Amino acid sequence: FSFLLGAFLLQFTIGKQWVHQMITSLACYAMFVFFPRKLSKTVVPVFLMTYITLGHLHRMYINYLGYDLDFTGPQMVITIKLYAMAYNLYDGHLLAKGIEDRAAKKCAPWAVADVPGIIEYLGYTFNFSTILAGPAYEYTTYAAACDGSLLYTADGKPRGKIPSQIWPTIRAFLISIICMGLFVVGTGHFPLLDPSDPQSATPVVLTAEFLSRPWIYRYLYQWVALFFIRQKYYFAWKNAEGANNIWYAGFEGFDKDGNVKGWENASNTKILEFETAPNVKTLSAMWNMKTANWLSRYVYIRTGGSLTATYGLSAFWHGFYPGYYMFFLSVPLLTFCERIGRKKLTPRFETTGSKWSPWGIVTMLSTSFVVEYMVAAFQLLSFDWAVANWKSHLFFGHVLCFVFYAVCSQLKTPKKKEV
């Protein structure tokens, strides 16, 4: 059922292009079945990243700067699922053999002992509630919801008082509807690109008329426009969250005492926490959360904590528009500033530890102020458009980061007794 409904949704949205998801799934399944675990955990990720890379390049070639819905969106989701499964099976192999491995121990809750049957496997890869927009959680999460082991013990007894899924489902659905409304209405009043021809015409924020306005107006307009653009992501993720909660896939289960853990399995963003993030670390953690889990569990810790490998793979997974890389390469500047600011300034001004303290509000506003400038490149995609946009703001985000770091570097680090 999960496979058939997922395939129907793909046929309805992207047409015959869903053959790419089928090819990918079957090819990886063959590797899981016939290759040793040590080999498949390398070959499968390489195959998946090569496939999605070619997909992104083909899309850019035939539809540069276009926003048409095609197979690359669902392909990004399936890439995360099968990339993770390759390591889940490898971890299961190591744990079964009693082989010491730090990464495998950390990811033990998601380890898979044996390759699932083809029906269960396709049900996971084409899962109707995740195939279009994610979230791409691990196979063990999907299987536990399907076989009932999430809610019941092997002898059929409830693991705790089973909560109703009605409110978690309706709540996520209502939020998604609100976000959709905000996106449609908001982007109509504050477009970033030219609504009549977003692919070729000069973006609204780069027209001569717009650039003739005062800087503060232009910046605030861009801030509001980007806020409304984010609503389409919130809509997709919250809608998918509700679709998972309705059949308990979003339910986290019970603790050892039978208490409910929560409904975070299918949560891909925390809107309020993201919009009021006091630093980039929190900002990143609250956005596309399941993708962040994938990068952390199956890239970062598997490469000995390599940020280069993690950010590099994340960039390739997103695609090859210059705007992506301009944004990804700019964010570390802000991260460096946050680190030195936390070391040199926070002990001097923070007294309560609350995000809503005067200092917390300062960090919140400053983070939003600079990130909204940098992230415009991610939405504009084109190198020329991104540079022109940053230039229209006199590159203030980059300049502020360099000046801030240079000034803070000269300050003495407060001693603990001064705090």
Image (cartoon, grey):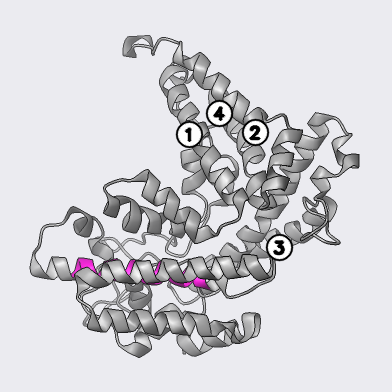
Q: Residues within 10 Å of mark 1 (few under 14, many from 20)?
A: some
Q: Left of 237 or right of it: where is 298?
A: left
Question: Which callout, 1 or 3, points to the residue nearer the camera?
Answer: 1
* Real-space Cα separation, disc 4 to disc 1, in angstroms: 13 Å
In the image, 201 versus 184, the foreground residue is 201
Q: Are marks 3 and 2 in contact (CB under 8 Å)?
A: no
Q: Quadrant of residue 403?
A: top right
Magenta span contains residue 91: yes
Question: Which callout, 4 or 2, points to the residue nearer the camera?
Answer: 2
Under circle 2, the secondary element is helix
* Real-space Cα separation, disc 3 to disc 4, in angstroms: 29 Å
* Real-space Cα separation, disc 1 to disc 3, in angstroms: 31 Å
Residue at image location 34% in from the left, 88% down from the top: 118
Q: Residues within 10 Å of mark 3 (few under 14, many from 20)?
A: many
Question: Which callout, 4 or 1, points to the residue nearer the camera?
Answer: 1
Amino acid type of the residue tagged 4 in the rendering:
Thr
Q: Are marks 4 and 1 in contact (CB under 8 Å)?
A: no
Residue holding disc 2: 369
Question: Relative to 218, does residue 29 appear above or below in the rendering?
Answer: below
Residue holding disc 4: 363
> Closer to the N terminus: mark 1 or mark 3?
3
Question: Relative to 89, does residue 126 appear above or below in the rendering?
Answer: below
* Real-space Cα separation, disc 2 to disc 1, in angstroms: 14 Å
> Closer to the N terminus: mark 2 or mark 1?
1
Q: Are marks 3 and 4 in contact (CB under 8 Å)?
A: no
* Real-space Cα separation, disc 4 to disc 2, in angstroms: 10 Å
> Closer to the N terminus: mark 3 or mark 4?
3
Residue holding disc 1: 335
Under circle 1, the secondary element is helix
Residue holding disc 3: 180
Amino acid type of the residue tagged 3 in the rendering:
Met
